[in-house]
Amino acid sequence: MVCVGVIGGGQLARMMIPAAINLGIDLRVFAEAEGSSASMAVSHVGDYSQLSELEAFAHNCDVITFDHEHVPIAHLEALQAQGVRVYPPPDALSLTHNKIVMRHALAALGVPQPRWAVVESEADYDLALREVGGFPCVAKLPVGGYDGKGVRVIDSFGAIADWTAAGKVLLEEKVDFRRELAQLGARRPSGQWVPWPVVETRQAEGVCSEVLAPAPGISPRQSAEAESIARSIAESIAVVGVLAVELFDTTDGRILVNELAMRPHNSGHVFTELSVTSQFEQHLRAVTDFPLGSPELISGIGVMANVFGHVDDLLARTASERFPEVKIHDYTKAPRPGRKAGHCVAVGSDVADTLGRALAVRAILRGENYDG
């Protein structure tokens, strides 16, 4: 039996568990704390920033993969040097650790992306501002930002004086976009690449709120371009596992790369119900170099709606009674305002109807009245 070790005990590791059981994989999870979302598969609780703890965990596994992207690259390189298979490999994963590194790498690949520049002091301001097309522009912390954190739309450099006092800041043009998209695919070490259809992601306060798959109204040209971009990135940096490429669909019809994730991704949760092969199964197939599964859709449209704060058992029961066809996923996380606590997925043949049912279930889970 192949043993796959997952570093991180969050909801992504949790959702790998059913896929691992079906594939006959021994899944072991390195969690940061007791009572994590993936507690059913936790075999080690500790500090992933300590190489010795990672070594103790990894040497009992055939391959190591990730629930998150926060493990120090130097530690992963050390594991790799000791003969541990680490997927995605550290060189690829480094692009997700530092947004400036990512922008340089994408530029070298000729991948379309927003205009960008790096500022570290006042001496950089004038040139950087010309590079990104002036104010307003987007400032990002290179390391540590996610889900809208570490991102500011600015009209002056005074708005990031606290950031530049501490180090480099990435500036990007404020892209005029119609909507945000995501292209997911998976690659195995032997090179096989399998994509899902491109999806539309809808944000609220900097965090993904809903995902519609396939992206409604997307043209064949844009679909082909999004898939080509993702495949080019995956092959060029030798990604192994699921790759999510977050994209801007601009008002002039261009597709630009916003962010990368090299693991199962929030934008791919919809495929658990919508596709023959979920992103969690596909990720495990990829990192074990098993033939990749079919991405074929089993329904015309799928909608995923994130649930924030808490998933109440009684409200979930009520929602399931009213909408038994909508699937609710509870991450069993401690309640916290704004925290992703779960999601629900509806599938169907009509975009408006499917979206309506997903939103209705989320409304019930929020404790809001639903009269539909």
Image (cartoon, rainbow, N blue to C red):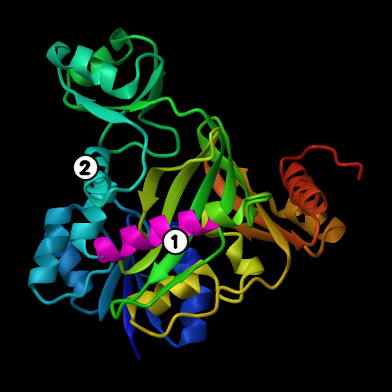
- For marks 1 and 2, the one nearer the N-term is 2
The residue depicted at 18 percent of the width and 77 percent of the height is 59
Quadrant where the N terminus is found in the figure: bottom left
Q: Is residue 329 above or below residue 161?
A: below
Per the image, the residue denoted by label 2 is: 104
Q: Position of residue 83 (x, y in %)?
A: 12, 77
- Residue extent of the magenta highlight: 223-238
Q: Is residue 30 left or right of residue 195?
A: left
Q: Position of residue 310 (x, y in %)?
A: 61, 45
State yes or no: discs 1 and 2 in contact (Cβ < 8 Å): no
Q: Quadrant of residue 296?
A: bottom right
Please state which of residues 187 and 19 is positioned toward the viewer in this rendering.
187
Separation of marks 1 and 2 at Cα, in angstroms: 24 Å
The residue depicted at 33 percent of the width and 31 percent of the height is 115
Quadrant where the C terminus is found in the figure: top right
- Per the rendering, the mark at residue 218 is none
Q: Position of residue 219 (x, y in %)?
A: 61, 52
Please state which of residues 297 and 332 is positioned toward the viewer in this rendering.
297
Name of the residue lying farthest toward the right: 371
**Helix, strand, or loop for circle 1?**
loop
Disc 2 marks which amino acid? His
Per the image, the residue denoted by label 1 is: 264
Disc 1 marks which amino acid? Pro
**Helix, strand, or loop for circle 2?**
helix
Q: Is residue 88 above or below residue 2?
A: above
Query: What secondary structure is the magenta-colored segment mainly?
Result: helix
Q: Does residue 47 appear in the picture of this structure?
A: no
